[in-house]
Image (cartoon, coloured by chain):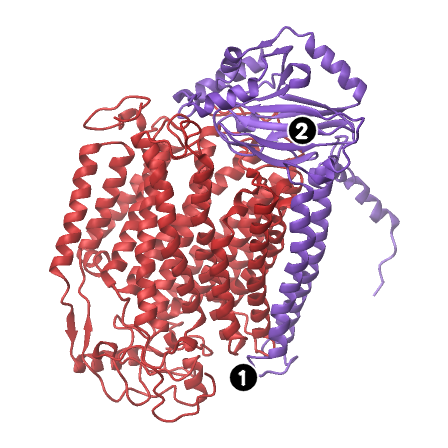
Chain colours: A purple, B red
Amino acid sequence: MFTRKWQPLRWVRYVALAPLLLLLNGCATHSIWWIFDPHGVGAKASFDYMMIDVAVMLGIVGLTAIMIVWFMWRYHKGKNRGTYDGKWAHSTTIEVFVWGIPIVAVGFLSWVVAINGSFAVNPYNPTVITRHLKPHGDPIEVDVIATDWQWLFIYPQYHMAVANELVVPAHTPIFFKLTSTAVTTDFFVPQLLGMIDVMPGMRTKDALESDSIGRYQGVAANYCGAGTSWMLFKTRVVSKSEFASWVHHAQQSTGNLTVAGFNRFAEPYININNKVEYFSQVQKGLFNQVILEVMQGRKWPLPMFMTENMVGYLKKQAAEHRA
Amino acid sequence: MLVNLPGPWNPWLGRLALSEIPYTNPILAPLFVVVVVLVLLMVAGITYYGKWGYLWKEWLTTVDHKKLGIMYIILGLVMLFRGFIDGLMMRTQQAMAVGPHASGMMGAVHGYLTPFHFGQIYSAHGMIMILLAATPLLVGIMNIVIPLQIGARDMAYPYLNALGLWITAAAVVLVMASLFVGDFAHNGWFGYAPIFELAYSPGVGVDYWIWTFQLVALGTTLGSINFIATIVKMRAPGMKWLRLPMFTWASLSANIIALTSFPCLQVAIGLVAADRYLGTHFFTAGFGGNLMLYTNLFWLWGHPEVYFVILPAFGMISEIIPTFSEKPLFGYVTMVLATFAIAGVSWLVWLHHFFTMGMGPYVSTEFSVATMLVGIPTGVKVFNWAFTMYRGRLTYTAAMYWALGALFLLLVGGLTGMMLSIPAINYMVHNSVFVVAHFHMMLLCIVYAIFGSVIYWFPKVFGYTLNEAWGKTMFWLFSAGTALVFIPMFMEGFMGMTRRLDWPFDPHWAPYLDIQMLGILAYVLSILAFVVMLYVSIRDRAQHRAAADAWGTSRSLEWLTASPVPFYNFAVVPQVNARDEAAWRREHGLSAQRASHYDAIHMPNNTGNAIIIGGLTFVLGFALTWRIWWLSLISLLAIIAMMISHSAKGDPGHVIPAEEMERMDREAERAMPRADLPRHSGGVLGGAIAYDSGAAGAGSRNLRGAPDHRP
């Protein structure tokens, strides 16, 4: 068998392929497998539930697949491996097992993962976060308004707001209230917290707590028109002191957000150039005011040049991007 | 006008104007030329060979369930191709546009499609694949197979059957028209409220989407009534409920779902139309509208629809695996129970399509557990197929390849489906490409089952088998495509890549998107293999002439009559003695039994009304899309007038005398090969009863007292 001489150098050449491994890891500080590399309390809990579910299901599905392949091999016609019984079509024992195994598995997963998990990471009151609300770590509130196609994050406790960037302190529960001006989309930071719909004229909630300082990518996870793919926001989890200085910095900016100013901000805009804007003053109750106005029928209609023929608009935006 | 219409409108042409034809679009303009040239070539060809009369008499006006089924399948295959081209364009765009530094062309910032164009493509892809490819393919196969499996001469309502086809065809033409006149919806195939409102989708795209949906829903509902009536009322004598072939059971459950759920869709889409045309506020964000209501109403249909397409596919697998295992289906009764369990639970799970809407843990949990319940009967089915192979004698034909491929896709789809059914997990992957990969596993399971059954039942319909080698080549190429496209897509889902990105922003995704392009290439090759398979099979059809029982190991009733099936299906309606009638007769040496006595039969007449009404529904849909009110009114009135006139006139049908039946049956018998394969006639055991002479669906008549070893 082993007539060929052992040639160590034959193996060395595979080292040349090692850089390919970088593809798996990327150059980022975090893994590119965002769902497998959670840094938020909720995302971590979701990941754990996923692992339990996959382990149970893979046990059943994997064994079934092996069984099918074995039957396929054993009962191949003409190979005479297994005995043929052309009449055999019923066995009460097997029937009990084929119903019993899925019933037991579904029962187990229902209780352990579906029911417990739904409460643990319930976006409105995730017990993984709320059950150890520390008296010293005051929660931060963030009001999120999605427009066509930007994100506005209002920090009502600090009367300031920032567009298209979310900055939160580590080790602190963050409670979000979310709404949208025009259409429905999804608020999602893959490594920190799961998706929650943002809907016009309605308020949803979500919560976040992270112990890992770092930069994460936030996205609009639901199609909401031409600007969806550019509706990105960097999410920075920073230390508490850094957060305080960031808030201070933001409060020094000149931007001022009244209801009228917001209505201008909410005009359709594709954020091709990753514009981040700071507003040092935000009119009190802006979030509720936006919901109320939408319920009363305010719309931000899309002009035809942002739908049917958007080549010109994109050209203009791209030119801005280069400038 | 009740709404503020953006853009011009005039009373004669509505919103239609020359500028709505995208003749400057570098993709659509050449495509339009190609389509026009192809159509002209076809017209010229038909005229040259003088086939217009043949086409009209034999196909366009037919009410024969087999011909209608064939046309359904051709329609479905053409739309499968169109949907694939959409998929190819989406994959190409994402592969080109990945990362913020990707260059752009043809007006796009990244890649070659502007976001709005990209939105139209994936919306069209989803809608076409589910409603205009999978559904017609399944309805077509049901159309051909069900009457044969239950020993009926035709469907219960042959004219309604034709009407269903031509209304579906009208929907197909409407969605194809949106390519070249105006545009299509950009809001996803299921639509989001309120983005489909006039304020956020000012063009005609959403209107095309609305009327295409309405037409195909109408066509499918009509079809489902027909299938249920046929299965309940037209079974051959002796075909008791627990002798019904599994595919017929699956189709029955699917059509019950269709009949009860499609009206839901029509209401939901009808209310969207009211919002856009009448200025109502059903699903608007303001003025008391409730946009979440739309999502509920849509998925209240949408999830049963998923089972409407998967259950017949399960039925097909349940026919193919026993035939090529040379064994009866394991656990037939539990299989029937499982089928109806899936159909029943399908009504209780719709909310899992939007767990992220934030309905709270109590509601989420209920729907999560209900969704997981689907896993129980589905698991039972998989186990039963496995135990059908156990102690069998497995022949690996191309049809068996596809059926087993479907089985493995179902395993992957089930594994990932159980993940998605759990809210805690769902929040992380809900709108990601992980979901896209998951439901493609399920829909490809259907496509695999369809290809399997096309190969399986092809000899029954056309009288010769398809080329096995090319069928297997196609299977491997197609499976390579499936693996190369969807394994990377599952991985991207775990990387947090969300769906419907017209440019994926993270450059790390690039290699995975490139691998998917290789998969697309494999799919392209598999399409070529399919074409070659058809060509080679048609060329060599004389060598591959099929006997009545084309596979030699077939089990159900349709394999008793001649191949190709004559227009009257069975010369004499057979007496059913067992669950697997063909196998039972083979085992009892009755395969060569011939009919001793023929009766005159009564067949329905052809009618041109169905295709004319279908054409008028297209005109109605087109006129409504473009808001040409006068044309809408005229076409609607014409449809109603045609309906009334057809009903008033009725169809006396025609009678074929007994001697003629005998002659045709002998001829069909002679045309089949006298190979060593077991041969069957349409003959019966003793007291044959044609269904038109009454007593259809009667109880078992085991006249010869032959042992009935299975219930």
What residue is at 44 percent from the left and 31 percent from the top?
A: B195
Is residue A27 or residue B250 the one in the foreground?
A: B250
- Specify few, some or many for label 2: CA neighbours under 10 Å numbering under 14, 14-19, or 20 or more: some
Question: In this view, which residue lies farthest toward the front?
Answer: A135
- From mark 1 to mark 2, how far is it between C-alphas? 64 Å
Is residue B249 or residue B22 the one in the foreground?
A: B249
Q: Position of residue B635 (x, y in %)?
A: 19, 41
Q: Position of residue B78 (x, y in %)?
A: 38, 50
- Specify few, some or many for label 1: CA neighbours under 10 Å numbering under 14, 14-19, or 20 or more: some
Amino acid bearing label 2:
Phe
| Direction from residue B403 to residue A219 in the image, left or right | right
Q: Secondary structure at mark 1?
A: loop
Image height check: is A209 above or below B568? above
Does residue B470 show up?
A: no
Image height check: is B163 above or below A187? below
Q: Position of residue B520 (x, y in %)?
A: 53, 45
What residue is at 25 percent from the left and 24 percent from the top?
A: B9
Does residue B319 show up?
A: yes
| Direction from residue B711 to residue B45 in the image, left or right | left
Q: Position of residue B276 (x, y in %)?
A: 34, 31
Could you tell which of marks 1 and 2 lies nearer the N-terminus? 1
Quarter of the image holding residue B183? top left
Q: Where is mark 2, residue-wise?
A: A175
Label 1–label 2 contact, CB within 8 A: no
Subunit of mark 2?
A
Q: For the N terminus of chain B, give its image quadrant.
A: top left
Q: Where is mark 1, residue-wise?
A: A87
Quarter of the image holding residue B676? bottom left
Image height check: is A30 above or below A95? above
Q: For the C terminus of chain B, give its image quadrant.
A: bottom left
Is residue A286 or residue B177 the one in the foreground?
A: A286
Which circle, 1 or 2, is nearer the viewer?
Answer: 2
